[in-house]
Amino acid sequence: MSNYCIVYWLILFIPSLPVKADTQIVYWHRLQDNPAAFQILQLALDKTAKKFGTYALIPSESMEQERAELELQNGRLDIANFAPDTAREALLEPVRIPVTQGLLGYRVCLIKTGSQHLFDPVQTLSGWRENNLTIGQETGWPDTEILEANQLKVVKVPKYPLLFTMLDQGRFDCFSRSISEVAEELNAHPELELEKNLLLVYRLPTFFFFKKTDKTLAKRLHQGLQSAYKDGSISALIKDYYRNQFETMGIAQRRVLYLENPLLTRPTREALEHFQYWLEIKEFQP
């Protein structure tokens, strides 16, 4: 083999060799279900690599959210992405910067096919109440309390898969879904359809959470997210990832119904008051 060939194959091979990272980070495996959030995690870590060193991301074994919180507390998990609440913020260390521009709080309705006429008269939140529309929610979801605090009627269901079945049976009118997750669910349930005109909006960010004593990793993510928002990296990523979906949904043309979220803790509420990078739906004109 010529020297040229040897050099060529070495160039191809060397990048694939394992490199020891300065920090190994075990993340909750469910982060992979949200590719945009996972890419933002990588972005924040990349932007702080010069100061904090190289990293390797390692997925956890499969686990539900309750166990993930426990694993964070005992240090067997390093990072997870949750919506904040009082108990979670007391037990874990949050970085109070919304990971995906607050996408979880921008909601549209999955509805039973043929039921669009129930929603057509609604112009305001009061109009929603006057038309006695009901929303299906899994028992224990944090936004269930938000909806009830805004005097909206909620039908509570014990298991997530049952919500699709019960919606199709007409047991409630709307299955409220984040605009970041509804497209995949609609593809999986072609018997349902997307309500055409309304957008429910309330402050429900997701934060990266850490063990209380893991101040170094929390500081790194705080600095990385700040940097990625300031230079426009996160906004550009969200636009690139979701533009086609959001334009297809027509979110920029929808009537917006604003809800209050009385469940936010005081530290979170204060942090969100200073956050400048909420999703701008007008940017998604078709």
Image (cartoon, rainbow, N blue to C red):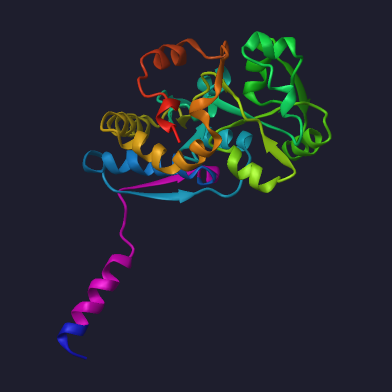
Is 98 placed above or below 128 here? Answer: below
Q: Return the residue found at the far bottom.
A: 1
| For residue 223, side relative to residue 28 (left or right) | left
Total numbered labels: 0
Image quadrant occupied by the C terminus? top left
**The one of 260 and 90 positioned closer to us in this rendering:** 260
Q: Residue at horizontal 47%, vertical 45%?
A: 35
Residue 67 locus on image (x, y percent): 62, 37
User: Picture quarter containing residue 172?
Assistant: top right
Image quadrant occupied by the N terminus? bottom left
| For residue 132, side relative to residue 108 (left or right) | right
User: Picture quarter containing residue 78?
Assistant: top left
| For residue 182, side relative to residue 72 (left or right) | right
Q: Return the residue found at the far left.
A: 3
Q: Is residue 85 visible?
A: no
Residue 87 locus on image (x, y percent): 57, 20
**The one of 54 and 130 positioned closer to us in this rendering:** 130
Q: Which residues are magenta?
A: 6-31
Q: Residue at horizontal 72%, vertical 36%?
A: 160
Is 253 magenta? The answer is: no
Residue 53 locus on image (x, y percent): 26, 45
Q: Residue at horizontal 69%, vertical 10%?
A: 151
**The one of 185 and 162 positioned closer to us in this rendering:** 185
Residue 85 locus on image (x, y percent): 56, 20
Is 20 magenta? The answer is: yes
Q: Is residue 184 visible?
A: yes
Is 51 placed above or below 88 here? Answer: below
